[in-house]
Image (tube, rainbow, N blue to C red):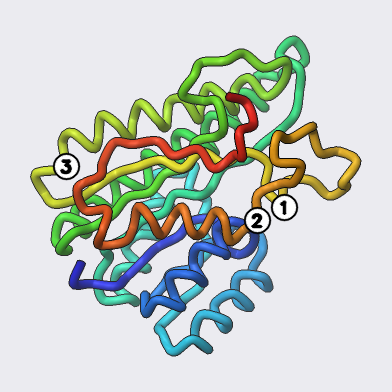
Amino acid sequence: MLLKKALVTGSAAGIGQAIALDLASRGFDVAIHYLHSQAKADQTCQLARSLGVKAISLAADVTNPAAAQSLVDQATEHLGGLSVLVNNVGNYRDVPTLDLSVQLWHDLIMSNLHSTFYVTQAALPHLKAAQGARILNFGCASAQHLLARSTNTPYLIAKTGIIIYTKSLAIEIIKDGITANVICPGIAENSFDLVESLPELPTGKPATLKDMSNAAWFFISPEASYITGQVLEVAGGWKL
């Protein structure tokens, strides 16, 4: 990978922030994306710059195709290219299937599945121009196993769709030297505000943000150049 230029969506805080700062620590210039959290995004941007790399914070509603295109264009122009795309955006709502509104159904599908497609489509021409580019998308634990849940049905449908989309994409872009893979998180340390809300976990504890950024780096690293279309669960045995 000759270029070290990365766009991480939803990176003002949480898992996205951890990945963006990990990449910055490895010498990647980074574009920090946010929708509403400008102060947090700007702070993350400053942390990245303190590591000696170029960084920019950019606002965009990536459920809108034109906004997704603009985000990618701005990131690429500012960074001077693009070699890594991490699609981390995706809302979550814990609502029983029978209680879902039409609006919430669409919102969850759009924020997870459609946003991943829109940003990736916009980024592909730039990634093809890079050497050894990487696409990393986010599913969720058990999405690949088609297991029902009592709540968050549209979220799970969207995450399963991301896995299918990523596998299909991987086949088509391997000729361009681009890999596409999926990380499926379980419960992370930032998933719940209250410890009492945590479900019973086989490990007895949630994943750390470092666990997530380590998994991301595995797929992004030069050593993973022969790995594509794969799904890695970072869930500590949860939902197996």
The spot of residue 65 in percent (x, y) is 39, 44
10 displayed left or right of 166: right
Quarter of the image with the N terminus in it? bottom left
Amino acid found under the numbered disc labelled 3: Ile
Instruction: Specify the farthest residue to the left.
Output: 175
Asked whether 110 or 137 is in front, the reply is 137
Q: CA distance from mark 2 to mark 1?
A: 5 Å
156 displayed left or right of 84: right
Say which residue label 2 marks: 208
Kindly indicate whether the residue at mark 1 contacts the one at mark 3 (C-beta within 8 angstroms).
no
The spot of residue 235 in percent (x, y) is 59, 39
Which label number is shown at residue 173? 3
Amino acid found under the numbered disc labelled 1: Glu
Q: Is residue 59 above or below residue 86?
A: below
Q: Is residue 232 above or below residue 213?
A: above
Quarter of the image with the C terminus in it? top right
Q: Earlier in the sequence, mark 3 or mark 2?
A: 3
